[in-house]
Image (cartoon, helix red, strand yellow):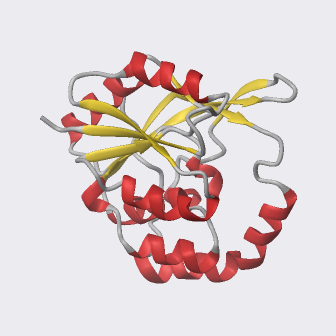
Amino acid sequence: MTTLTVVTLTRSLGTKTLGRCKESVQAALVPGVKHVILVCPREEFHTGMRYESARIDDYTTIVDDDDVIEADSLSKCMRIINDNELDMLFTDEVIQIEQSGVRYESMRGRRTFASIATTPLSAHNLCILKSSAIDPRSLQIANSHGIGIEWLMRASVAMTGKVGHLPEPLYTWYQHPGQHSKVYMKKFNACFPSLRKNIGDTWGIKTGDITQYR
């Protein structure tokens, strides 16, 4: 049986939003799938922990401690992965703006390989990765540029493996104040030219749309 670990990294078990995350993941568990919560109060260790935790099972996915997934999400994803021997499968998502209560569905154009290789916003959906397909160089690139590891792990698998898209909003991203802030985006934009070149030089950048599965 193919196994999957859902990983949630949190600063504290007392984090206010962790309860809704745990509840949603527990409701979605199926045979062969487990939920692991890792506690790390120090932000500087999170990149390394996310990378290491993504390699602990046949497949892994990260659900942030303030986000939720749909009850049928994991069963649908695992069926598609097993039927098609995918290295990566990602879904659509709903964005919930916490301070205003605004809620909307968003794809942000991530149906293409090029978009996955060029934006960290592609890291805010349900994405299941085959652990053995994750390139260790993604961690090196993340550390050298100070950019989120989840996006780069996905880019490494997307550019080199078999990828699928499930076009259903099975993940809710709770966007909190300061997320993708001006400070972060200024930092990202400053290093983007060298970062994109690094991605292209390391894995190449595929062209075209990503196969959709139902």
Q: Residue at x 65, y 51 (%)?
A: 121
Residue 89 visible? The answer is no
Residue 123 image offset from top left, x and y in percent? 57, 49
**Residue 22, relative to residue 143: is it above or below?**
above
User: Quarter of the image containing the C terminus?
Assistant: top left
Task: Place residue 30 in its image quadrant.
Answer: top left
Nearer the observer, 38 or 63: 38
Q: Which residue is drawn at 43% across and 60% down?
A: 51
Q: Where is residue 188 in the image (x, y as percent from the top left)?
A: 73, 69
Residue at point 58%, 50% (across, down) = 122
Q: As displayed, is residue 118 above or below residue 33? A: below
Kindly give the residue lying farthest to the left in the view shown.
1
Q: Is 51 rendered above or below residue 91?
A: below
Provide residue 74's location: percent of width, then percent of height.
36, 27
Q: Number of callouts in the render?
A: 0
What's the residue at 55%, 71% (across, down)? 142
Provide residue 97's location: percent of width, then percent of height.
Answer: 79, 31
Residue toward you, 44 or 191:
44
| In the foreground, 33 or 191 | 33
**For residue 108, side relative to residue 100 (left or right):** left
Residue 128 in the figure: left or right of residue 209: left
- Left or right: 173 as drawn, with respect to 3: right
Q: Do we see residue 16 in this rendering? A: yes
- With respect to residue 172, does 135 lie above or below? below
Quarter that holds the N terminus:
top left
Instruction: State the image quarter where residue 14 is shown.
Output: top right
